[in-house]
Image (spheres, rainbow, N blue to C red):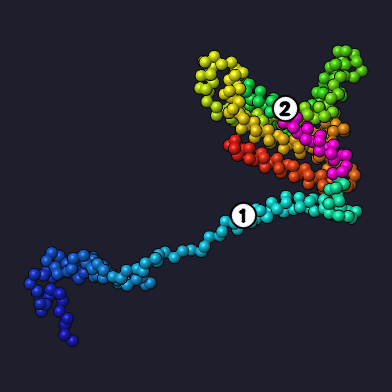
Amino acid sequence: MADVPRPGGPGTAHVPGTRTPEHPGDAPGRGSTARPGAASGPGAAPYGPGTAPDRPGAAPSGSRAPQGTGTPRGPRSVPGWLWSLPPVAALALVFLYPLALVVQQSFSPENGGGAFDAYASVFRSHSFREALGTTVWLAAGATVGCLVLGFVLALIIAFVPFPGARAVAKFIDVFLSFPSFLITLALLFIYGTVGMANGLWTDVSGSAEGPFHFLTTPWGVLLAEITYFTPFVMRPLLAAFSQLDTAQLEVASSLGAKPARIIRRVILPEALPALAAGGSLVLVMCLNEFGIVLFTGAKDVTTLPMLVYGKAILESDYSAACVVAVVNIAISVGLFGLYRVVSKRAGA
């Protein structure tokens, strides 16, 4: 078998102008006839630009990719309304379903009759009209008292420097977490029949009993509600006062304005949105207050929540109780809508 001539060995033709590599795989040197841009080095593919072999699934060399094609998209994302279904279903099951049962029961009298017979019977009753009037005037009176007292206390805390003002402001935040019956019990210890005030009076005067018996009257309920709900007005007021530019107060004071005029012309306009928001919230909460009326022991004070309790628990008249509850819910939802509108305009 004839020997295969080795490169550069005997019998190999030499082309002028070229240099023979000393080892196989060496890159062509200067004067080589290799095309510019060709890859070099061991294992390098001897292809120039545009001549690389096609990869599996890739477009042929030198061809342009079709317009509008790119990386394939993954699976489509789940619509947002599907994510909201579980929490909405949970809320409907926990809150809306019991309310729906109450409304249904109000239209289904236990002793038979028409759907609106229970409503007609409740609306004709003197106890319902009296409870509705008591609820409205107590809620309105407590709201006015909270607005006046809360505005005065917020002014003192915000603009009258005294030691412990910051601690008092922090205590207001803590006070908001207290249950309403706790405040009522505190008032009972002070103004109750055997409370501290009556005990001090009997010790000093020698009387058999003290003069303070108002806590079991509507005025005692009103005092308890004002005491408990005033911080709900102070909290937004303090937030509004913290945003007030003190330069306006300094300019008004330097021009000779009295404190009352500064409050009326500078501070009050800035506080009106916060007052409206806090007052709306207090009005809604007072309409639904049950614990304060119950713990004061005011037997002659019947509000709508107390009437629901009496009809359902004491008289076992569930249809009438549900009617009163529906009326209470309708009033509360309407006032809550008003509160949301006022809060939105106030930026709360």
- Residue 133 visible to the viewer: yes
Question: Residue 39: x, y in percent?
Answer: 23, 66
Question: Residue 196: x, y in percent?
Answer: 82, 21
Q: Quick check: is 301 in the magenta stretch?
A: no
Per the image, label 2 sits on a secondary structure element best described as helix
Quadrant holding the N terminus: bottom left
The residue closer to the viewer here, 181 or 134, is 134
In the rendered image, the residue lying farthest to the bottom is 1
Residue under the point 69% across and 41% down: 336
Question: For the residue marked with disc 2, what is the amino acid?
Answer: Gly
The quadrant in which residue 159 appears is top right
Between the residue at mark 1 and the residue at mark 2, the CA separation in whole angstroms equals 42 Å
**Relative side of 195 to 156, left or right:** right
The quadrant in which residue 226 appears is top right
Up-down relation of residue 187 to residue 203 (above or below): below
Question: Residue 164: x, y in percent?
Answer: 62, 21
Q: Which mark is residue 84?
A: 1
- Report crowding for label 1: few under 14, some 14 to 19, many 20 or more residues within 10 A (C-alpha): few
In the rendered image, the residue lying farthest to the right is 208
Question: For the residue marked with disc 1, what is the amino acid?
Answer: Ser
In the rendered image, the residue lying farthest to the top is 205
Residue under the point 80% across and 30% down: 221
The residue closer to the viewer here, 131 or 193, is 131
**Relative side of 94 to 39, left or right:** right
Per the image, label 1 sits on a secondary structure element best described as helix
- Please name the predominant secondary structure of the magenta segment in the image: helix
- Residue 174 visible to the viewer: no
Magenta span of residues: 123-146
Q: Which mark is residue 145?
A: 2
